[in-house]
Amino acid sequence: MKRVKKYINRILNIIGRPEVRILPGQIAFFVVLSAVPLIALISSLGSMLSVSLDGLLNMFTDTVPEAVMNILEPAFTGPSFTAGFSIILGFIVASNGTHSIILASNLLFKIETKDYLRRRIKAFFMLFVLVLLFFFIVVILGFGNVILKMVLSLEFLKQISKYVYTIFILLKWPTAIILIFFMVKLLYTMALDQNIPSKYMNKGAVFTTCCCLVITALYSYYASNFANYSKFYGNLANIVVLMIWVYILAYILVIGIAINSDNYNVEKNVINK
């Protein structure tokens, strides 16, 4: 209980930091601006690789608020980027979200930011990691069952197919959570303009991964069953739900960065002593 109380007090102290209260709004703004281009870009790449995004669309429908899907669904089903210039433009717009994560990370770690060009190039690589994360989630959560059934339909695997499929169903979500954790950890590590070992990103990545999954599910249920945003915002209700959802996720992301910076500073002070 003492350790739990100490951890809760530490989180409350982190939340009370001025940067933590300011930065989520900046990240949320750029993430909302880049959300539709990013999804359209993923849809375009999926079409080029002959990959259906129905699994990803169904996963979003089952987890995020319905009002958010009303805004994002056209990006999945609408016309994709066709020209190379459009794809590049989509990357530029979508990288604003990852660029804001870089700025927030440097500020919380009190690291001097490098020149603008280097940050933009790094933002592109971080965006590429996000795109890979989306595709891995599609393969594991969206089409994992179908792919495994096709593999297990081979004659020499039929005897063990039942057991393998059961194991896959049990391990599917834990595998996805582990994958998300490592991707978040990689983003946290890449975001800094200073070489800091990735081991200092573990606690923040665990916090972010768990909270994003839990908070998204809770907020989706609340927004779909209890909240009545349309009564106050009318036709803007869907946008309001999207902004609140993204802001909550951005807040969690920033707290995760702050946890990492706090953990790094504590261990660095211990080493110096």
Image (tube, rainbow, N blue to C red):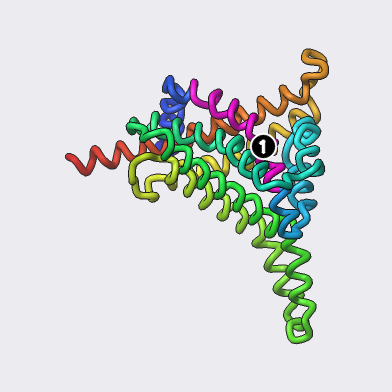
- Depth check, front residue: 100 or 92: 92
**Quadrant the N terminus occupies:** top left
Q: Which residue is mark 1?
A: 216
- Depth check, front residue: 44 or 182: 44
In this rendering, the answer to whether 180 lies above or below 222 is below
Query: What secondary structure is the magenta-colored segment mainly?
Result: helix
Which residue occupies 33% across, 40% down? 264
34 magenta-colored? yes
Q: Quadrant of residue 107?
A: top left
Does residue 3 appear left or right of residue 271 in this picture?
right
**Quadrant the C terminus occupies:** top left
Q: Which residues are magenta?
A: 22-42
Q: Amino acid at mark 1?
A: Thr
Label 1 crowd bin: few (<14), some (14–19), many (20+), radius 10 Å: some
- Disc 1 on helix, strand or loop? helix
Which residue occupies 72% across, 49% down? 44
- Depth check, front residue: 234 or 101: 101
- Depth check, front residue: 97 or 215: 97
In this rendering, the answer to whether 102 lies above or below 43 is above
Residue 249: image x %, image y %?
A: 59, 33
Residue 21: image x %, image y %?
A: 49, 21
117 magenta-colored? no
Q: Quadrant of residue 41?
A: top right
In this rendering, the answer to whether 230 lies above or below 92 is above
In this rendering, the answer to whether 259 lies above or below 173 is above
